[in-house]
Amino acid sequence: MLKVVLQRVVAVVPVLVGIAVISFFLIRLVPGDIVNVMMGEDFGDPQLEASLRRVFGLDLPLHVQFFDWFGALLQGDLGQSLRTRRPVTTEIFERFPTTLELAMAALLVSLAIAIPVGILSATRRNSPIDMGARVVSLLGLSLPNFWLGILLIMTFSVYLRVLPSGGYAPFELSWDHLKFLVLPAVTLGTSLAAVTMRMTRSSLLEVLGQDYVRTARAKGLAENTVIRRHALRNSLIPVVTVIGIQAGGLLGGTVIVEQVFSWPGLGSLMIRAIEQRDYPLVQGLTMVLAFFFVFVSLVVDLVYVYLDPRLRARG
Amino acid sequence: MAELVRPEALPPGTAQRSRRFAALHAIARDRVGLAGSVLVALALGAALLGPVLAPQDPTQINPGERLAPPGGQFLLGADELGRDLFSRALYGARISVQVGLVVVVLAGLIGVTIGLLAGYFRGLLDGVLMRIMDTLFAFPTLLLALAVVAVLGTDLINLIMALTIVYVPAFARIARGSTLSVSEEPYVEAARSVGASNARIIVRHILPNITAPITVQFTVSLAYAILVEASLSYLGLGVQPPDASWGSMLATGKPYLEISPWVSIVPGVSIMLTVLGFNLLGDALRDAMDPRLRSREL
């Protein structure tokens, strides 16, 4: 088991380094460089330009710049925001909990919809429930989440006036805070639910066709027991992977959903950074979110190994 | 009893063609596939014939007709500047389908080439290429597209470049996986033993046999590319005004939800139906090309 865990952890290292390398070079693609962006209207003062380049180390050869930057990265230094002059890490970690809260809530919503509907759909295959669930899930897959968000705002904020159309209140376990969370979480969760539900359904269907399920039925076990005790547990293993893969969609989705509902998390920070051409912040955010995605995938991978004894034995 | 046709009596490529016909036939019989094909045909038709069908210039501002409701002069209503929503939706289809197709074709060409090379030559080349792909794959799709657009600036070409970069790894992975298994087939070994060059083996023997999974990936990526383009345009980082894009139309319609919801509904429904069409078609294609999946009724 330990060997498998170590193998997976070590395999992640080159990907993390790769993400850092790509993030470093991404910012070098900016037409001109960040000094041009910073100077704005002062552009054209060669002395100021040269001194700024020196300050940022942009006069050094590229590989030296890279290793300086990478060294700082290893110490958790992602540079400074061009606009606020605060460390990028501070900017990011201030908003991280807000996005995490939205992402977790969305994940809960998606599981609460996807698992029961997926099970119902598989156990009542080709029934109206199954057909309805499959059509709705395909619709969910095709619905851009900003459009779903707008539809929900239209229904619950404009017509029914029961929930706010956007905004945020500092975290506390009260309706005053949670009422802001409901619509963004449902918006993001619904689009994730579509994929998870399809996976739950197809995976359970596959398991229900297995010999050991037939044996369980042949023993005379009640259908409920067959599903609960024998089929469901095995069928949920691939579902765990799908949830892991969706972490990426979840993080990307927060960018859009936060924008629709004015939720002050990393997504809105990213859009602000892009609009203000705050490149160090864009770079830092891209990298931190990609790291986070890799971390979540790794955790899911390990959970998978834990759940599936065959994989454990292989190590 | 029907006479059996000896395989050597058939013209070369017949088996492949008949497989394709079987797949097309299966899609036509499948109601889901048929619905998908109809929606895709509508989107393609709107994209191709948009300029002919559009009753008005999509950028024509009519100050007296701001937010006009559907009906009368404006079939689907007018937006906040009095521009005809039906015409804008048609032009939006043009941009969405165009961006989607260009992105998927480019990403497909680059990705499949990478996958073929990595899967066929293996070794160091495989290791290096696939590690790069893995790294790109590690970025959440929309985030990578956002970052590239942020750095390069917002215009249509940059948008296409950003989306292409995002979709290359998926094609590369699928092509590599299929190439790995096809390279082991006896006919590839046979080709090699009669002295066929690597290029010939890849183009003539491997590529034609890995088209099924790539076709499915093509359709599914097209659906997602259209969604991501719409998302970026919604955020103001894709197609720029006054050009009509479904995403930006939705963004401009948001403040008018209460008084004139049609400004948001028209582009929203357009995106949904187009993406749904490609998703349905992708599903049907997957089922038709892989009989194992068909029996499992995914």
Image (cartoon, helix red, strand yellow):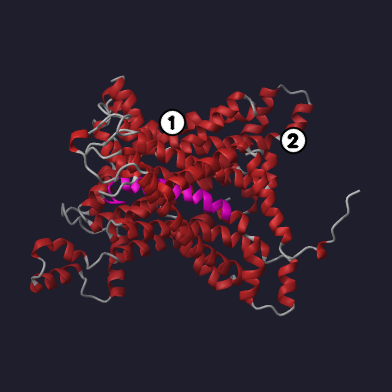
Do the residues marked 2 and 1 share a common chain? yes
Q: Please give the range of residues in magenta.
A: B215-240
For the image, the number of numbered tags is 2
Let me know if residue A33 is in the magenta part. Answer: no
Of tags 2 and 1, which is closer to the observer?
A: 1
Residue A78 position in % (x across, y down):
27, 58
Let me know if residue B222 is in the magenta part. Answer: yes
Q: Which residue occupies 51% across, 36% down?
A: A138
Question: Viewer-proximal residue, A125 or B48?
Answer: B48
Q: Which residue occupies 66% across, 23% down?
A: A224
Q: Chain of mark 2?
A: A
Quarter where residue A49 is shown? bottom left
- Please say if A168 is above or below A307: above
Q: Earlier in the sequence, mark 2 or mark 1?
A: 1
Residue A31 position in % (x across, y down):
25, 66
- Please say if A217 is above or below B241: above
- Labelled disc at residue A212: 2
Q: Chain of mark 1?
A: A
In the rendered image, the residue lying farthest to the bottom is B195
Residue A6 visible? The answer is: yes
Image quadrant where one finds the C terminus of chain B:
top right
Question: Viewer-proximal residue, A256 or A291?
Answer: A256
- Labelled disc at residue A188: none
Q: Main secondary structure of the magenta part?
A: helix
Residue B162 position in % (x across, y down):
37, 58
Q: Estimate how packed mark 1 is, as few (under 14), some (14 to 19) or many (20 or more) residues with alpha carbons within 10 Å.
A: many
Element at label 1: helix
**Which amino acid type corresponds to the residue marked 2 in the rendered image?**
Tyr
Q: Which residue is mark 1?
A: A109
Cα gap from disc 2 to disc 1, whole angstroms: 32 Å
